[in-house]
Image: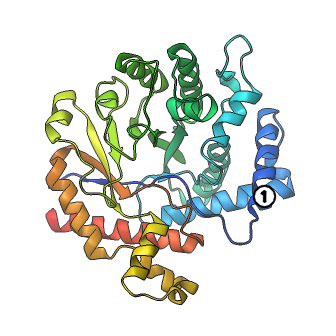
Amino acid sequence: MSGKIFPIIDDIGSFPLPSYIYKKRFDNFYWDAFQGLINGYDIFANDGIKTNIINPINTIFEMKCNSGIEIANYPQLMDMYTQFIKPIQDYEIKSEPNKIDPDKAKILEVEILKNWAKLRYEDTGEQYNLKICVTGPLDLYFKKIGFSVYPDMALNFSKSVNSFIKNSIVNTEYLKTKLVSIDEPSLGYVSISGAEKEDLIKIYDKSAENINCDVQIHLHSLNSFRIPLETKNINVLTCEFASNQKNVIDKSFLDEFDKQMRVGICQTSFNAIMAQKMEEGINYSQFDSIEGLRLLIDSPQKIKHNLKLAIKQYGDRLKYVGPDCGLNAWAPPELATELLSRTADVVKKFRNQKQ
């Protein structure tokens, strides 16, 4: 590992809202802001949008960047399905169901962060690294239509996903999209009918077509790993590892198809962790404060252990590490940020010891 940054620290998008923001108000203003953006209005001049949408997104992104992770996903504060299904429905090309007008395929959070990063760059000269996540074509299809997959219909979702991604690739002196994640948590858990493996590979490749940066497929299970493994345009597989060290594939598959891995090394399944702590005899009242809630975060020793296991499993095919799936349940945001900071600190200390 000498002489190289190995592995890179990223995160998964979802995050808790600040306590001063009501979820219902956030959801309402989110779509006001989205429509304003699409229609060319100055959303940054609207006080309601600024208070309920722009400020929390900017604040949380800054917290993520300051936590020590190296590529921060935009704060995904909206439901991962509604965030993409609603614009696809609202701006669908009528002759092609589930295919969004490419000009309307915007990720609101990215547009907000471009403005924030530009202003910060003018003060500090610092460039920020951005990760974007887009709910994958099959998960969108499952949510809207069901588990009987008609390949042509699914390909329209793929084209929509590809448009969202392409419109979110930023390459400026103040903000740069370094990493894309296609989020498919259902793959490997659900039974799919109507489509062959080759159809599913084509669906994923269309989603990631002509993207000039690393493309992850965010999986919870590796049960169906052969599908993304055989794609041309996805080069990083991911998995929930901290919560299940048996959720692995043999490194030889990655070598054969020239793929890399992103592995979760800190648990994020909030309710399961709390239940386990209570089984161990910790009284529920201890979690009434943020100090008590910090007890739920994996210890540095446990995170380091998971990191070493992942490196042993994947070696130089391990390119990215970070927490398991998103942090929406880890409220307030300061608690979620502590989890990010602890994970990043462990990786950096381990990296320095090996160089």
Residue located 37% across and 30% down the image: 234
Tell me if 61 is positioned left or right of 224 in this view.
Answer: right
Side (left or right) of 316 relative to 66 = left
Q: Position of residue 111 (x, y in %)?
A: 66, 43
Q: Tell me which residue sits at (65%, 22%) in the image.
A: 98
**Residue at mark 1:** 24
Q: Residues within 10 Å of mark 1 (few under 14, many from 20)?
A: few
Q: Quadrant of the N terminus?
A: bottom left
Q: How many marks?
A: 1
Q: Amino acid at mark 1?
A: Lys
Q: Is residue 107 visible?
A: no
Name the quadrant containing residue 135. Answer: top right
Q: Residue at x 22, y 67 (%)?
A: 305
Up the image or down, 95 lies above or below 123; here it is: above
Residue 115: % across, % down: 67, 49
Observer-nearest of 155 and 73: 155
Q: Position of residue 16 (x, y in %)?
A: 60, 64
**For the point 63% across and 50% down, which residue is it?**
113
Q: Circle 1 sits in a helix, a strand or a loop, which is it?
A: helix
Q: Quadrant of the C terminus?
A: bottom left
Q: Is residue 35 left or right of residue 81?
A: right
Q: Is residue 207 above or below residue 78?
A: above
Residue 237 appears in the rendering: yes
Q: Quadrant of residue 168?
A: top right
Q: Taking 334 as reference, is 130 above or below it?
A: above
Name the spot of residue 327 as percent of width and height, x first: 51, 61
Task: Give the colour scheme shown.
Answer: rainbow
